[in-house]
Amino acid sequence: MTEKRKLGLSTQIFISLLIGAIVGLALYYLVPASSFKDDVLVGGLFYFVGNGFIRCMQMLVVPLVFSSLICGAMSIGDSKSLGRVGGKIILFYLCTTAIAISVALAIGSLINPGIGLDMELIEVAQPTVAEATGVVDTFLNIIPVNPVASLSAGSMLQIIFFAILLGVILAKQGEKADTIIRFFTQFNDIMMDMTVLVMKIAPAGVFCLVAKTFSEIGFNGFLPMIKYMLGVVLGLAVQCFIVYMLMLKVFTGISPKVFLKKFSSVMGFAFSTATSNATIPLSIETLNKKLGVSKKISSFTIPLGATINMDGTAIMQGVAVIFVAQAYNIPLTPTDYLVVIFTATMASIGTAGVPGVGLITLSMVLVSVGLPVEGIGLIMGIDRILDMTRTAVNITGDAVCTMIVAHQEKAINHDIIMQDVDII
Ligand code: ASP
């Protein structure tokens, strides 16, 4: 019964997404600017409901990640198994990102997005440039100086580090720490219930977010950039529907069709919000309830993935590098390609999955091969729609790697995967 209601919710999210896009485009093209349209509808109602919904999901991220990670680490128990799960997932995350950027570079070289570009038609914006952090400091930053400050700032890797330590120690203490163990277990259940509650407003939230975005961008800016956009979307599609699905089938034997059907509502959510971070609660919940993945694995791998694994973002960066190189007529050598693969893989580590962050880390990638950072200004105007699409791929990559590791750790319930397959 409950399951049926939930399946209804996924469908509702999709319908809202679609209607939102149609309403947004209709507003952009058919309704002239007026204070009712701009201030009351788009800037008022859509903005309030859409952002209110994102804030509700964001509100859950830190308490949910913290408590579910502690519970996850407690239930894995020994630090050896934890190290094994951690090692495997990081390896998968790094490999998928390297594949993603290679796919993007290949597609970019094939499509030549920056050749024949009419610069006159492009709106150039002022880019934000990222401060490059050294590799050593990036890793050092994982250790929190003050865990309470990390919690309040939402620094995901630091929270993960502290929560795992706490979970491992609680598991060791067992009976002795009974009260604290019960506290976190119950707190985690409460946060999960809160996620389900907040998701009830998802259809309205998704509708408003998508309608607002489309009512502001329309298609006009897309035309001169169409080759670049096609390159990115093609790369994302190859990664999502070929690379991931092959990996899923080969490593777990699970049907890609079933996975996509059950996970598509999470992809729709990520698409409308363009933030991997806010998607964490829904992703953990869906992997658990619909795809049988034990929370002891997903509570660890999903928040980690939202921070360090951004394959969709890497794809955009790969195509963007070729686009900028061609637009400014700067040739790239094979070594440059290797440098891009390395820098783009590293750039995503430690940056939170929030809207637009991929454009900021792109500056590091461009600088690494001597391309002008101003190139980002060329693609900024049309980035939002690509941000939405790549975020959906980012979180799908995290989920597929999680399914593989959970399968290898025998922490996946295959009966749940096959439940309700026909009625979705
Ligand atoms: N919005 C993306 C995410 O949250 C990051 C990016 O590519 O800008 O995963």
Image: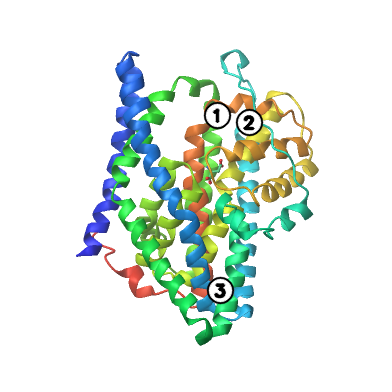
Q: Residue 190 appears at what percent x and percent y?
A: 37, 64
Earlier in the chain: of badge 3 and badge 1, it is 3
Q: Residue 372 appears at what percent x and percent y?
A: 74, 28
Q: Would you say the residues marked 2 and 1 are in contact, meaning their CB atoms lie under 8 Å apart?
A: yes
Label 3 CA crowd tier, 10 Å (few <14, some 14–19, many 20+)? many
Earlier in the chain: of badge 2 and badge 3, it is 2
Q: Which quadrant holds the C terminus?
A: bottom left
**In terms of image quadrants, where is residue 300?**
bottom right
Q: Dot 2 lies on which element?
A: loop
Up/down of 173 relative to 73, above or below: below
Label 2 CA crowd tier, 10 Å (few <14, some 14–19, many 20+)? some
Report if residue 322 is visible in the image. Answer: yes
Report which residue position mark 2 lands on.
112
Q: Which amino acid lies under the numbered mark 2 shown in the image of this protein? A: Asn
Numbered mark located on residue 331 in the image:
none
Mark 2 and mark 1: Cα distance apart in space: 8 Å
Q: Which amino acid lies under the numbered mark 3 shown in the image of this protein? A: Gly
Q: Is mark 2 within 8 Å of ligand 1?
A: no
Report which residue position mark 3 lands on.
167
Mark 2 and mark 3: Cα distance apart in space: 50 Å
> On the rendered structure, is 312 left or right of 202?
right
Numbered mark located on residue 227 in the image:
1
**Front residue of this view, candidates 65 and 28:** 65
